[in-house]
Image: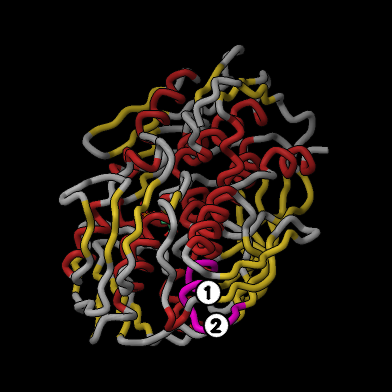
């Protein structure tokens, strides 16, 4: 993702109004595809997100021998069947497993491959090959998995699993659902109980979905365990809408005068809607209503209205995992609030698709807003009357969440902005601009 072409984002001509369904949740879609590939039998999936990241997971499991027959539906989602490799195991791939831009694919895949004696090289794009992988390889090595070259921190790495996996209790140094999932997936095949303890709760989609595939899983607020050896059995999974995508619509509605929007069919998993809580604490007019449950995942509507007087707030360290992907867009909202907003302990942002901490501070400074880091805390001094200067050009650096955050500056402001590498929104939300324009038409 390094084209320098910029897309001009024009201000929306009207307030955002009406209702919208966001595309399927990215985290749940990855898990639905990967777990189905591991399972015995044929799983039926619906509501799956059609985006570049999820396509990376589909491509990788196909290279390993799963049969993926997911087709585009009239609503843009993917639905169909995945036949897993089950007890036969994955086949030796012919070439490197390319995870593209998807950290979730790469890290979960390490757990998926752990019980099998094949040798697979895992790689990705320029951004992914810079991201830290030791957090996953370290616990998996304790379980008996081998990675080469020895001590390598980043992709590409070659993994060789083992049928003699050792169960572990792992006190994770960070709240990371990717890490937790990789260890639990390996634990399914180890002889005994594998436990991951976390310093703060991370998203729990794995703990909610594994029992649907017949794997006994126990979970508390900061701990999750599986008992092995077990095996995954095919099942039906419906994927609700993605709160991380909904967050862009919600934040746009909060900032654009006159807006009144209802986002339907969106996951209301508490580990994912921290952004709603943060917006509430800023005084935003936002509410949620649960309408159903898909498997064990609750979903419903998020209603948001324009809010003229926002106030800064402090988000404590133990809530960061519940907003980790939404911090850039929440930082933009904080830039419009009265007073200082502080996001505590957000060092993880430095190792996302880009260094999002640096990018957010630089972007807000371009807007004329004071933002700074103090240790690992992000501080933003909001301006309730903020008006973005004309002629702004933002570089997303190929980071989808930054592309959408900076696009919002143009969409809800008075002047157009240019966003470089805007096409990367296809990683998680290909219809982002269409949905915004439809709500404002
Ligand atoms: C994800 C977990 C989070 C999140 C990422 C998706 C997942 O990462 O940022 O976009 O699906 O498990 P960490 O596990 O690194 O916190």
Residue nearer the viewer, 122 or 139 = 122
Report if the CB atoms under discs 1 and 2 are less than 8 Å apart. Answer: yes
- Residue sitting farthest toward the right: 441
Q: Residue at x 74, y 53 (%)?
A: 20
Q: Is residue 183 magenta?
A: no
Q: Which residues are magenta?
A: 33-43
Seen in the picture, residue 178 relative to 313 is either above or below; the reply is below
Q: Residues within 10 Å of mark 1 (few under 14, many from 20)?
A: many
| Left or right position of 96 against 286 | left
Residue 142 lies in quadrant: bottom left
Q: Is mark 2 within 8 Å of ligand 1?
A: no
Q: Which mark is residue 311?
A: none
Which element is circle 1 on? Answer: helix
Residue 330 on image: x %, y %: 49, 41
Residue nearer the viewer, 417 or 23 = 23
Quadrant of ligand 1 in image? bottom left
Residue 299 on image: x %, y %: 61, 69
Residue 420 on image: x %, y %: 56, 24
Q: Which residue is mark 2?
A: 234
Q: Is residue 40 magenta?
A: yes
Seen in the picture, residue 347 relative to 323 is either above or below; the reply is above
Q: Which residue is mark 1?
A: 36
Q: Residue at x 32, y 62 (%)?
A: 119
Q: Earlier in the sequence, mark 1 or mark 2?
A: 1
| Left or right position of 350 against 192 | right
Give the distance between the C-alpha atoms of the residues marked 1 and 2, in whole angstroms. Answer: 6 Å
| Residue 344 appears in the rendering | no
Q: Residue at x 16, y 50 (%)?
A: 151
| Residue 165 appears in the rendering | yes
């Amino acid at each position: 993702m390094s084209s320098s072409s910029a897309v001009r984002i024009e201000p929306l001509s009207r307030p955002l109004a009406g209702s919208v369904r966001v595309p399927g949740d990215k985290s749940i879609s990855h898990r639905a595809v990967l777990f189905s590939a591991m399972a015995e039998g044929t799983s039926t999936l619906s509501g799956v997100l059609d985006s570049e990241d999820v396509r990376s997971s589909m491509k990788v499991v196909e290279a390993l021998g799963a049969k993926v027959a997911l087709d585009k539906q009239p609503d843009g989602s993917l639905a169909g069947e995945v036949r897993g490799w089950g007890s036969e195991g994955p086949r030796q791939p012919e070439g490197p497993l390319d995870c593209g831009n998807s950290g979730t694919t790469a890290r979960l895949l390490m757990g998926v491959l752990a019980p099998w004696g094949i040798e697979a090289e895992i790689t990705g794009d320029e951004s992914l090959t810079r991201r830290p992988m030791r957090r996953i390889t370290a616990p998996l090595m304790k379980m008996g998995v081998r990675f080469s070259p020895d001590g390598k921190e980043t992709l590409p790495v070659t993994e060789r699993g083992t049928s003699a996996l050792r169960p572990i209790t792992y006190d994770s140094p960070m709240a990371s659902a990717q890490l937790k999932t990789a260890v639990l997936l390996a634990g399914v095949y180890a002889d005994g109980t594998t436990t991951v303890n976390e310093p703060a709760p991370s998203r729990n989609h794995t703990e909610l979905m594994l029992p649907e595939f017949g794997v006994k899983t126990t979970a508390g607020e900061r701990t999750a365990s599986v008992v092995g050896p077990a095996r995954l059995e095919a099942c039906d999974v419906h994927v609700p809408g993605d709160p991380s995508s909904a967050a862009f619509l919600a934040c746009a509605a909060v900032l654009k005068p006159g807006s009144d929007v209802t986002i339907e069919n969106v996951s209301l998993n508490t580990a994912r809607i921290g952004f709603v809580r943060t917006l509430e604490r800023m005084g935003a007019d936002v509410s949620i209503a649960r309408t159903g449950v898909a498997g064990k995942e609750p979903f419903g509507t998020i209603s948001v209205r324009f809010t003229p007087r926002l106030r800064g707030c402090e988000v404590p360290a133990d809530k960061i995992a519940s907003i980790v992907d939404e911090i850039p867009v929440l930082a933009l909202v904080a830039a419009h609030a009265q007073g200082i907003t502080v996001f505590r302990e957000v060092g993880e942002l430095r190792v996302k698709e880009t260094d999002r901490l640096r990018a957010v501070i630089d972007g807000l400074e371009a807007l004329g807003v004071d933002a700074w880091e103090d240790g690992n805390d992000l501080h933003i001094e909001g301006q309730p009357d903020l008006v973005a200067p004309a002629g702004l050009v933002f570089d997303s650096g190929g980071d989808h969440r930054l592309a959408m955050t900076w696009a919002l500056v143009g969409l809800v402001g008075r002047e157009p902005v240019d966003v470089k590498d805007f096409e990367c929104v296809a990683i998680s939300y290909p219809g982002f601009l269409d949905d915004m324009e439809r709500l404002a038409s």
